[in-house]
Image (tube, helix red, strand yellow):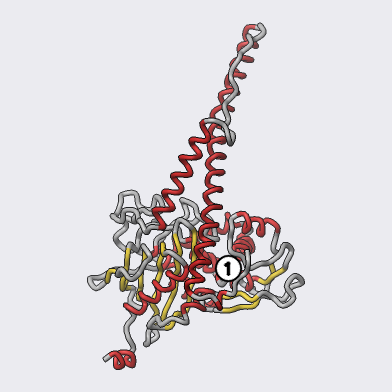
Amino acid sequence: MNEFNLDELQDDEMEAYEEQRRLERRRRRMEMRRMKERQKKIRRIMKVTVPCIAIVLVLIFGKLALTGKEPEKVEYEPAKVYTPGQGDLEAEKQALSDSVTNTETGEEQGQTLANEPTENSGEGIGESASVSQPPTGGYHATSTDSTAAIGGEVVSSYAILVDTQTGEIIAQRNPKTMINPASMTKVLTVLVAAEHVTDLNDTFTITQEITDYSYKNDCSVVGWEVGEVVTVQDLFYGTVLPSGGDAAVGLAEYVAGSQEAFVEMMNDKLEQLGLSSTAHFTNCVGLYDENHYCSVYDMAMILQAALDNPLCREVLSTKKYTTSFTEQHPEGLLISNWFLRRIEDKDAGGFVLAGKTGYVVESGSCAASCALDGSENEYICVTADSTSSWRCIYDHVEIYKTFLPQSEADASVSE
């Protein structure tokens, strides 16, 4: 794919570019889903047939041992294993394809699942949390009689704006409906890592497994090569600014030895924050998984906790960063927070301090950000299921302009 200079693209060109990338990612994910479904069917069949064959053999040889006679010849048909291109599987493949297409089409058209509270809270993406009262520990925010509904100018299906000083939800739209947080997940990744890292100048070697993982899952990457030695500080900035999957997995392995062990630490942190009843993560990158979920409310609380950590606050607020000089990259790699660089050109009614974006087909374009009003009070905004990364930025601008208090200077001008 040709490389574009994002700074020179106009809005309409960027929309076309984003649409092209979105279609390509959707095609890849559909193919991967079909492959996974075929593998699951084969595994289910083998789980049934192999034990049955073993039982038959045990019975036959058991009878032989008891009677001393040779067993009669037992003829049976081998288990039918589906393979691509054979009969019934084609119909199943078509049904699966239609199902995936219908699901994704519904998401693109802005269709949302029921938002009424359900008895089984947090069982899957799109289900509303049944917890109406804030948790007793950790971070929480509450709605009041003055909490506003976010209007139709905002495209995102899910949105929330929180005043971090008062803990009040200023405005909302489906704030506790379960979504896939996509790369907003990395806010929790850097928060957990920051609480366990003691030396930012320590080094980490990028492995083949890490680069393969990023390529296989179509992750955004910093661009390091196998065997490249980078600093732990590089891993932090690489996880957030370009949303690097290679940096996030590297950070997880550095802290916990493996991504699996690190994910356990992430879920422990969710429990400490009082969010474990409605949020659960299965990876540190933000890849889609039906058991990887939270709400925009949960993500607002995660971002608030991250901003209370000095290291995370610095990383999430940085627009540009150059990685360490290495043998593979003697001048380092210049990486940037695209969201912060683009939103600073818009009149958001306040200064946008920090931000992290995300995208998977199942969640649409999403973002979590923090802005300061004229009195330097902090507000956190989280949105999900917007139609593009540009539209996601405009949604945050619209929410901030609508609901952030005006400074005295702004108020006098408007009068």
Q: Amino acid at mark 1?
A: Thr
- Determine the residue positioned at 57% across, 59% down: 262
x%, y% of residue 113? Answer: 34, 53
Q: Nearer the viewer, residue 281 or 95?
A: 95
Quarter of the image where one finds residue 193 = bottom right
From the viewer's perspective, tell me whether residue 47 is left or right of residue 173.
Answer: right
What is the count of numbered marks? 1
Q: In this view of the protein, can residue 248 be seen by the observer?
A: no
- Residue 392 at x, y percent in the picture: 43, 69
Can residue 401 be seen by looking at this rendering? yes
- From this view, report whether residue 33 is shown above or below residue 343: above
Classify the position of the C terminus by image quarter. bottom left
* Residue located beneath label 1 in the image: 239
Q: Nearer the viewer, residue 86 or 408?
A: 86
Q: In the structure shown, which secondary structural element does the residue marked by tag 1 occupy?
A: helix
Say if 258 sits above or below 35 in the image: below
